Amino acid sequence: MPTDDAQQFASDNYSGICPEAWAAMEAANRGHAPAYGEDVWTARAADGFRALFETPCQVFFAFNGTAANSLALASLCQSYHSVICADSAHVETDECGAPEFFSNGSKLLTARTTSGKLTPEAIRALATNRSDIHFPKPRVVTITQPTETGQVYTLDELRAISATCRELALSLHMDGARFANACASLGCSPAEMTWQAGIDVLCFGGTKNGMHAGEAVLFFDPDFAEDFGFRCKQAGQLASKMRFLAAPWVGMLESGAWLANARHGNACAARLAQAVAGLPGIELMFPVEANAIFLRMPPDRMEALRARGWRFYTFIGGGARFMFAWDADPARVDALARDLEAVALDRAA
Amino acid sequence: MPTDDAQQFASDNYSGICPEAWAAMEAANRGHAPAYGEDVWTARAADGFRALFETPCQVFFAFNGTAANSLALASLCQSYHSVICADSAHVETDECGAPEFFSNGSKLLTARTTSGKLTPEAIRALATNRSDIHFPKPRVVTITQPTETGQVYTLDELRAISATCRELALSLHMDGARFANACASLGCSPAEMTWQAGIDVLCFGGTKNGMHAGEAVLFFDPDFAEDFGFRCKQAGQLASKMRFLAAPWVGMLESGAWLANARHGNACAARLAQAVAGLPGIELMFPVEANAIFLRMPPDRMEALRARGWRFYTFIGGGARFMFAWDADPARVDALARDLEAVALDRAA
Amino acid sequence: MPTDDAQQFASDNYSGICPEAWAAMEAANRGHAPAYGEDVWTARAADGFRALFETPCQVFFAFNGTAANSLALASLCQSYHSVICADSAHVETDECGAPEFFSNGSKLLTARTTSGKLTPEAIRALATNRSDIHFPKPRVVTITQPTETGQVYTLDELRAISATCRELALSLHMDGARFANACASLGCSPAEMTWQAGIDVLCFGGTKNGMHAGEAVLFFDPDFAEDFGFRCKQAGQLASKMRFLAAPWVGMLESGAWLANARHGNACAARLAQAVAGLPGIELMFPVEANAIFLRMPPDRMEALRARGWRFYTFIGGGARFMFAWDADPARVDALARDLEAVALDRAA
Amino acid sequence: MPTDDAQQFASDNYSGICPEAWAAMEAANRGHAPAYGEDVWTARAADGFRALFETPCQVFFAFNGTAANSLALASLCQSYHSVICADSAHVETDECGAPEFFSNGSKLLTARTTSGKLTPEAIRALATNRSDIHFPKPRVVTITQPTETGQVYTLDELRAISATCRELALSLHMDGARFANACASLGCSPAEMTWQAGIDVLCFGGTKNGMHAGEAVLFFDPDFAEDFGFRCKQAGQLASKMRFLAAPWVGMLESGAWLANARHGNACAARLAQAVAGLPGIELMFPVEANAIFLRMPPDRMEALRARGWRFYTFIGGGARFMFAWDADPARVDALARDLEAVALDRAA
């Protein structure tokens, strides 16, 4: 078994570039084009987002999620403000302090959660716990849709959160590193899941969705977008040959690949979830609502699985994480399911 | 005449992706690969740099030059230090304060120059002008090779500068946004032009050289590279699908395209320079040593040139700038030469 | 009962300037003196610290503890590093994100503690929990001596912590906002409690100790102090009329008031602790080892106490906090004890 | 001649604490008082400013001018904005990069001036020179009143500048390190020289005016003051024993010492200017409009003056600078005048 097959579910960042994104890059790579976003591809990508979201939002392109989320948060607060997030939020656990760096010191206030989902109550508690000058004033809430463990906020949950934010004068940011998977999961429109539900700023992830790199930052409130282009430039996030960061978006959006890719990943996760249901000693740690599965199993079962060549991370709660990207091979999903069954039954035997 | 043809010399950022870089991306886009630089392409690209530079340097990959140069400078100083550069250095004039942002406040001290070349004397003057606590302590020198106006430091000039830096306890950074063009111009090895001449850190530009994006940061002194990976990550410069940032480098380095591309650009510039020599009213503003040409001409000649469809910038000294990328079309260079002659003779007539 | 009497134990920041500090300021206020620390008082204060600590340490003066601690921590790490501290550490809970601001983004990693005392085990756990590039690399440990709740690390505890720090390549910083109280408590020399126990940098608090303002930053390892003066200047912590920040230190150190003041505060705390021992429904929350007392009591007892005019904070664990400064009035301590007894017996009755 | 006498004119930072400020500190040093600005002195000082400026401005207290000016500027712009100032402005030349640090990277754009006075034309030129995304967007203008060389903007000049600022959507900040001297010079009210002339934020210097330390930041537009207290706290500029930073202001404002002190300094400068008028080889470099005098004279005359014990700086244009503080001794002014005459005539002889 080639290593490649065995490791593909370790992360959805292990996936390649999808055909639609690739074709658009190829098309963009003809002749010359103005730099720094003055090209036709950039305009077309931005228009694509405005069409998809059914609103004249402001669109910016950043190289990766670290920067997109950090810059968006920095635009919503000052260094002496704080940002409310879940304890398992990527911005807290896996960005090496990027939000603090880009904002020059904003503190993240974390709410203990089980599935990475914030609630109005948790937000209110953190936002009202301190109001003295010795503690950074809460100003922003960031939610991850879907969460790190693959749960999806419902539209009702989103609306309840945004209502609380408005009441408490907090801005609401959505980290959509896997935004498309959430859309596919809820079956709702991007508009419904964002500005219509009260989201102020969205970071829409393109990398995991099938691009070589790239995240789009969408401001639904133009006031927050003021001079954001300068902010991106200063922070090293303005591509000179912008067409190669924008064209893949055109390919993804115009073809619908953004959604099809997400559906495929979600379907693979669901397929594996179904296959392992009822296996002795193997337990789903979280509801499977997007493209992630976390399996709790005894350490020796993990070892047995690894012995069969599978690669996976265990950094969340010690469970085995499997992520399914746009290019997840269903045959390999089934092979994983068979191996899980095998190691489970060994255990039971 | 299609717009594309007419604007291609406005900037070398208008160029596309060269075949060698493209082919490597295509090859990298097979199957799955570990993220964040744990893939084989990243290792191979780093090894490629070490082979090319004939030294076990530390290699990091950033998305663009804004970030690469700013992060490199930040690694060489603290916020209360200052960075000596030419008044026309890109870090001073066109990065929207990125060096100050990444370093959290380091001041740039600029030397007045005519061609963007610092001298030992200019460095010494700025480095010794103030030594009191009320002014940021000079700690780094950054030189651009070639300069913004296309001049190339000779090896002797580089050695003289680095000797001065060592004497004054200053680190020496090279902004090599067009590093390959300088190598092609001097006909020397990358090693000779960098660590053998006393350069501590180099930012080697890939974007203008033929890639879709990407700069390599090379530390010749491993001490300066300590924890630089963390710095990149925090600053939003660690690509998740790193293989697509690394593979183009493999294509460029292993094929020699990095140098061939630069030679082509330089040759186009030389070709135009030769063609316009002696034209009345049109004057080369700077020696043509790389892939740039700046022409001083009367405003009405500029207008006439624009009327013929040519696009060019005039932000440096009011002259018409033409840049020649790896994909500059020699036929269009000749067409430009003919049009320059035409507008010049109109004028003279 | 005048308000003043009733509120004096709410905080040791409510105290005034002690006679020794005042007299030195008065003496310093004769004639003219060079600015920015070039005066004789500054030299004398620095020498006073070197004499007191029996070592040629580097001494800097900052206006307050927020800045002193944040600048010291910033000098020990970079923005992509992290700082290990107790969950109740002042730098985490009451500095409005100052450490993150001065360091441009360093994250604080907090250990759950009961009395604010870090242990080698807690440090090791936080320092070794993550070593990947996606999380800020632990680089510094900061301990508060005494802690926010008034506990004092023993010399053995300090030595054990510093041994762990050295093993893990972590620097060790001591927040000594009430450093003198810890010295008074342990009866050891400042040298024993700092560099001889492995502390790299100390912030010695002067404000609570009896000055109008001012903290001293002492570097026992000169490497860490490199260019620290520039850091202070840039961060707005270099006093122009430095003599008025330095002279009080001279008054405190040369007279021994620094220690006498602390002893007085500690003694008042002990006096109250003794007086309330055994009172029904009133419980000491923490061992009384410095100048703080935290009393757990039913809410109605707190109300009753407040009704008698006493002011106190309850932000730590809901207990009533009383702080005893250099100028705590023993008669008022006794009055407080009597009132505590009264409200306690009411309750019991 | 004691050193003290000879050096007193080297800087107005060499002066001590004036009796009115001292008396207020003494009065404040009775009993206990709430910390962090919740005391009566702080309220009284803020009210004093509102009365003096005849407007309900927002008032904050910082330890020194480095911080006050930097925090004020940071509140008016973001890191990717720029600040227009004179080339000789203190924020540019003598703050060790503090504005860049507090703002996390805002660039200072300097206008070449002869006396440190910006003009509408110079502001317009810098504000409109660049509007592309590659250069920090101009957002703030800072003027120093009086300038580093002692010139005072007239009310008409101020109004013309503020009109230009409004037209160009720039905020207007006044660095008033010696604000009182400007008031004394113009004979106008503080209101006329600030908000009535279009100033948005003023930093009113207390240190040189006769206090031990302290600057007041006055926001005439409350929008700019939003959360400024948090900003001060995070940046290490919130004094715990605030009463000792506020009380001297009470002493200065309520007694009128702020103005009397300034008048004295100005008068001493005028007295010396008059005395040296016409001396051969000694020339006033700038009009004497506040408390500074700069004298151009041959190097050997400077040496001769130093040989007579006088201390002075020459960092501006090589001239001998003399500053006259609130406590400048007129007898010493006359002595200096005599010595200047002596060295001048020696030269002429």
Image: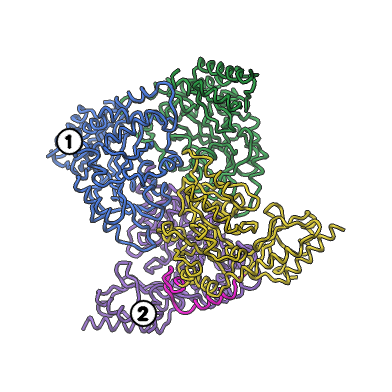
Chain colours: A blue, B green, C purple, D yellow
| Image position, residue A57 (x, y; %) | 32, 40
Given the current orientation, which residue lies at the most extreme right position? D349
Q: Which residues are magenta?
A: D16-43
Which residue bears the numbered disc 2?
C272
Is residue B143 toward the left or the right of residue A102 in the image? right
Q: Is residue A261 visible?
A: yes
| Image position, residue B253 (x, y; %) | 47, 24
Q: In the rendered structure, does residue B315 fall within the stretch colored magenta?
A: no
Find residue D217 and name its label: none
Which residue bears the numbered disc 1?
A270
Give the residue type at disc 1: Ala
Q: Secondary structure at mark 2?
A: helix
Residues at circles 2 and 1 in contact by the CB criterion of under 8 Å: no
Front one among D173 and A328? D173
Front one among C274 and C299? C299
Q: Secondary structure at mark 1?
A: helix
Number of the front mark, 2 or 1: 1
